[in-house]
Amino acid sequence: MSAPVSMPRLSQRLMIFEVSGNPFALPISEVLEVVEQSGVRCVPTLPRETGGVMNWHGEALPVIASHLLLGGEPMAQRADDEVQPFLVVTDRPDGGRQLGLPIDSVCGLVDGEAGRPHGDDIVVERRPLDGRVVSIVNPVRLVATAEEVIESRTSGQMSGAAPYPS
């Protein structure tokens, strides 16, 4: 009789995705959904190139430009009616704060542990996965940094500065 096959826990699976051609991974337990949607809406006090909001199951989900969180080049602007893939990321599997993260594509799932956080870094580790070196992302720092970006980009706007650069 063969031993029962054990399935990896959700926390031991990573979703690999690409942003500007660079591979990243998040624990699948913190990815609530992969959404293909068009039309991120502007927030009057937030510059459009920083982010906006999208409708996610009737809720306004904050969206932040990926390069502001993960580095690299800004993603190419899409037309308002062009579909864009997003990851809906949470900072806790049991339901915490959520973030819409624009991506280029989902590459797949792999078995592997999430990296151990080191300080305030979003990328906690780089390791070979699925035949390439992938940056492992800390979802707690990702969501917290997104909130910091929103606060820093809107704080100057509240004092009467123009919401969009001229």
Image (cartoon, rainbow, N blue to C red):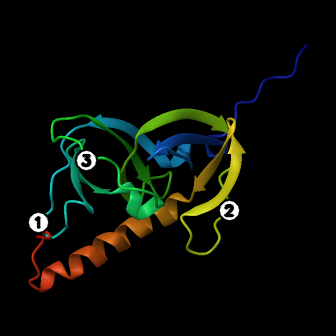
Q: Secondary structure at mark 3?
A: loop
- Cα distance, mark 2 to mark 1? 37 Å
User: Whole-percent x and y of residue 118?
Assistant: 65, 71
Q: Nearer the viewer, mark 2 or mark 1?
A: 1
The crowd level at tag 3 (other Cα within 10 Å; few <14, some 14-19, many 20+) is few
User: Whole-percent x and y of residue 102?
Assistant: 35, 47
Question: Residue at (18%, 40%) from the top-left corner?
Answer: 79
Identify which amino acid the numbered label 3 is placed on: Gln
What label does residue 116 carry, if any?
A: 2
- In the rendered image, the residue lying farthest to the bottom is 159
**Closer to the N terminus: mark 2 or mark 1?**
1
User: Whole-percent x and y of residue 12?
Assistant: 67, 43
Residue that numbered label 1 is attached to:
44
- Cα distance, mark 1 to mark 3? 19 Å
Task: Mark 1 and mark 3 in contact? Answer it, CB < 8 Å.
Answer: no
Residue that numbered label 3 is attached to:
77
Identify which amino acid the numbered label 1 is placed on: Pro
Q: Tally the numbered discs.
A: 3
The crowd level at tag 2 (other Cα within 10 Å; few <14, some 14-19, many 20+) is few
User: Whole-percent x and y of residue 10?
Assistant: 61, 41
Q: Looking at the picture, does residue 143 appear above or below residue 34?
A: below
Q: Looking at the picture, does residue 81 appear above or below residue 115?
A: above
- The quadrant the N terminus occupies is top right
- The quadrant the C terminus occupies is bottom left
Q: Secondary structure at mark 1?
A: loop
